[in-house]
Each structure stands twice: as C-alpha cells, then as structure tokens.
Image: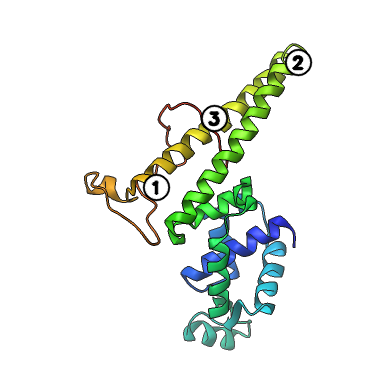
Amino acid sequence: MSRRSGILEFAVLGLLRESPMHGYELRKRLNTSLGVFRAFSYGTLYPCLKTLVANGWLIEEAGSTPEDALAASLTGRRAKIVYRLTAEGKDHFEDLLSQTGPDAYEDEHFAARFAFFGQTSRDVRMRVLEGRRSRLEERLEKMRASFTRTRERLDDYTLELQRHGMESVEREVRWLNELIESERAGRDLRSPASGGSAQQDTTHGASGGLPRAGDTPRTDTPDDTAT
C-alpha cells in the first residue's frame, strides 16, 4: 500500500466513524475538510472503498433512507450506496489513531492525523505534535545550512524562494509550540468562548485552547515542525 492510499484509508475510516455516507458525501468532506485531498478523484476514492469493504472494515448499504430506495426503484436508477463503518473498522481506526510512528510526522499524514485530533487521546496528540515539531526543526536546520552554503551562488529570486520556505517552516514551528503549550496546560478548545476558563480534558476530544492554523502565532523563538 502506498503512503498516500494509506492516508486516504485513514481519513475515510475517520469520517465514516462520525456517520455513514455515500461516495459523493465522502468526496465532498475529504475535499472541504481535509485540504490534503483537494485534488483527488472518484477514481481514487472508490478503489479505496472497495478495499475497505473487502477487509471487513466497511459495509455497503443500498439507499440512505427508505424514500431513497423507493425513488430508485420507481425511476429504475440504482440506489445510492451508503458506506457504514463496521465494529472491526472502528477497532482498526482506533488502532491507527494510537500510532505515533515517523509516518505521523510527515506533511500529508500529519494533516490527516490533525484533522481527527478531536477523536484522539491527549497523550497521543502530544506525541504526534512533538514528533512533528522535531521533524520540522531538523528540516529547518538543513534549510538554513543550505542557504548559508549557496547564497553567494544563487540569484535574488532563488534566494527569496528559499527564504520563503524557511519562513513557512518557522511559522509552523511557532504554531506547533502554541499547540503543545495548550495541550500541556490542559486548556479546552472551547474555553475562549466561555471567558477563557480552562477545562481539563483527560480522555478524547477537546485539544485545548488551540490556535487556528490561519491565526498569527505568538512570536516565540522559532521552533520547527510542519504539516
């Protein structure tokens, strides 16, 4: 299995854990909720779904409602196929959520993992965030070293592109620092709306006073990690 197909399977299982969906709904959610899947097609999704069904992690059901099934029978069209997570599929997804190996720190996989942090235990979230930060810090160190070695030989536009890349990594590291600080403090994601009162979360769900990915992070000493 390729890395990208593994990420897609993870995301599909995670979305179906929330509720059963048909293919169109799944593709829409993957495109809108998980930016990493913006460019993928039905030709990618349906083979993934077939694999998950064959593994016993999903089941197919014809028609999302009795009305849909009746409409399909009257018009002669095929009823929509709805995909539902099985008990084995839920267990498999829980196992995937608990994994914190190096793949969880890579760009695309981290984005998918982060999208399901609301279903992930705090200790696992912390390990993934810290692993991602460490990976980005290593990347930033290499980028800075390369920039120092080559800056005299490169034209202004190439140098500007390298600076832009380093600044992007630095921003993500600062963002990760904020997330890690929030996790350690046990702040609840919804606490700002309730006047900033901290809530302790020791199980799943709220990740704690999290800065949004689009927010301007606090200016700390740049620490590195990426999505």
At mark 1, the secondary structure is helix
Comes first in the chain, label 3 or label 1: 3
Q: Residue at x 60, y 52 (%)?
A: 104
Comes first in the chain, label 2 or label 1: 2
- Relative height, residue 95 to residue 197 (above, below): below
Q: Residues within 10 Å of mark 1 (few under 14, many from 20)?
A: many
Comes first in the chain, label 2 or label 3: 2
Report the mark closest to the observer, 2 or 3.
Answer: 3
- Relative height, residue 90 to residue 74 (above, below): above
Amino acid at the residue labelled 1: Glu
Q: Residues within 10 Å of mark 2 (few under 14, many from 20)?
A: few
Report the mark closest to the observer, 2 or 1.
Answer: 1
Image coordinates for residue 173, horizontal then vertical, percent? 52, 35
Residue at mark 1: 183
Q: CA distance from mark 2 to mark 1?
A: 42 Å
Q: Residue at x 66, y 71 (%)?
A: 49
Visible in this render: residue 160? yes
Amino acid at the residue labelled 3: Glu
At mark 3, the secondary structure is helix
Q: Residue at x 71, y 62 (%)?
A: 44
Tell me: 8 left or right of 177.
right
Depth order, front residue of 47/63: 47
Residue at mark 3: 170
In the picture, the disc for residue 100 is none
Amino acid at the residue labelled 2: Leu
Image coordinates for residue 134, horizontal then vertical, percent? 57, 39
At mark 2, the secondary structure is loop
Say which quarter of the image contains residue 203.
bottom left
Give the farthest residue toward the top: 152
Residue at mark 2: 154
Q: CA distance from mark 3 to mark 1?
A: 20 Å
